[in-house]
Image (cartoon, rainbow, N blue to C red):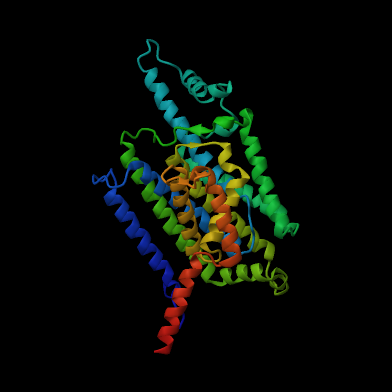
Amino acid sequence: MQRSFIAKNPSVLIFLAILALFTLLVTVMSEGFGVGGISTSFIKTLGKTLCLCLIALAMDLIWGYTGILSLGHFAFFGLGGYMIGMWLMYERTRLIVVDSLANAEIPPTDGEVIDAIGNQIFGVVGSSDFPLIWAFADSLTIQLALVLLVPGLLALIFGWLAFRSRVTGVYLSILTQAMTLALALYLFQNDSGLRGNNGLSGLQNLPGVTASQDYVSLWFFWASAAALGAGYVLCAWLVSGKFGSVIRGIRDNEARARFLGYSVETYKLVIFTLTACIAAIAGALYYPQAGIINPAEIAPIASIYLAVWVAIGGRGRLYGAVIGAAFVSLLSTWFTGGQAPDVNLGFYTIKWVDWWLVLLGLSFVLVTLFAPKGIGGLIDILSDRRAAKEASQ
């Protein structure tokens, strides 16, 4: 008798239950709900952390299960943020311009309104004309579609060129990093159409919504939790069936998988494109909570951090990727936010704001050398001991 997906993956129900309980607890303790036990700023931090957990799932799927160390997935994360950020900035600016011109003696023409919007958005880079890439910025539906289409198309083209050439290993990692660097350098230019180094700002203000940030932060937190839950179920479903067996086979021995008749390049391309889309969704939810996005967010170092999170959590384990991203993200907030007390050694004072990245790098090295299964490996040990105890009874 064939077992159901849930029967084969009880961890999925456990994860969803923990996520639902966490979401409910945070909601009840939030300022928007009235209790005020958790500040609105920390609600945003938790919402952003959930988005980082979602992109960590994508990284685990491409690296932990397929064996492709991509150092470019934060490029897709950033593109997702830019796509939704364009609509948020355009529509918010349009409402401000329309409101300011409402009392004019002569009603403005549509062209004058567009010019005023363009001047408000692009005046910082010395322009007032809308670039071609903003052609659909006034349509929420199209921009939401572009959240998936733009990163997905980039991943499809890049993956097709790389995989058909059978580029593997460290060479593929370097190529993905080069793609990310090229995109970041392009976006830094003022004529890129996305305001160069200034990026897109004010994204936390939803156009036409008069509710306070206490409520808006909760809405995005709920959306982030829902996206993480759906992403976890999707990834678990993919890796639990034949598809998961094939990609693990590609990871362990690509030549043997090809010899057995599997189209290795097709599987790689599908997983690369799919994870790019998951990363883009995470970015589209992350940056409205961050309030701003600029090219520095897409720098190659961000994708390296992503690999570190997954390694610390335990690659090849979906829950490990989530644990690693959440653990490092919250710990980073604590250390870099000035909440961790300085340590006075007498001859030197350790300021964690300056030493956090060193601590993170050291943690990655120690995990790689002494605990290759990461934090998630501890759960494996407990599960194995429980199974052994039940078998002995």
Q: Is residue 288 above or below residue 312?
A: above
Is residue 336 rendered to the left or right of residue 100?
A: right
Whether residue 271 sits left or right of residue 161 in the image: it is: left
Viewer-proximal residue, 353 or 170? 353
How far across and down, in percent of the image, does residue 66 sit? 62, 64
At 48% from the left and 32% from the top, the residue drawn is: 201
Residue 352, image x and y in percent? 49, 46
Residue 135 image position (x, y, % from top left): 55, 32
The image quadrant that residue 124 belongs to is top right
Residue farthest front in this picture:
346
Question: Among all residues in the image, which is located at the extreme left?
Answer: 34
Q: Residue furthest top?
A: 105
Q: Where is residue 1 in the image (x, y as percent from the top left)?
A: 45, 83
Residue 48 in view in this figure: yes
Q: Point out the image quarter for the C terminus.
A: bottom left
For the image, the number of numbered tags is: 0
Image point (46%, 80%), residue name: 2
Q: In this view, does 103 lie above or below 181?
A: above
Q: Residue furthest bottom?
A: 393
Please indicate, yes or no, whether residue 152 appears anywhere in the rendered image. Answer: no
Front-lying residue, 105 or 21: 21
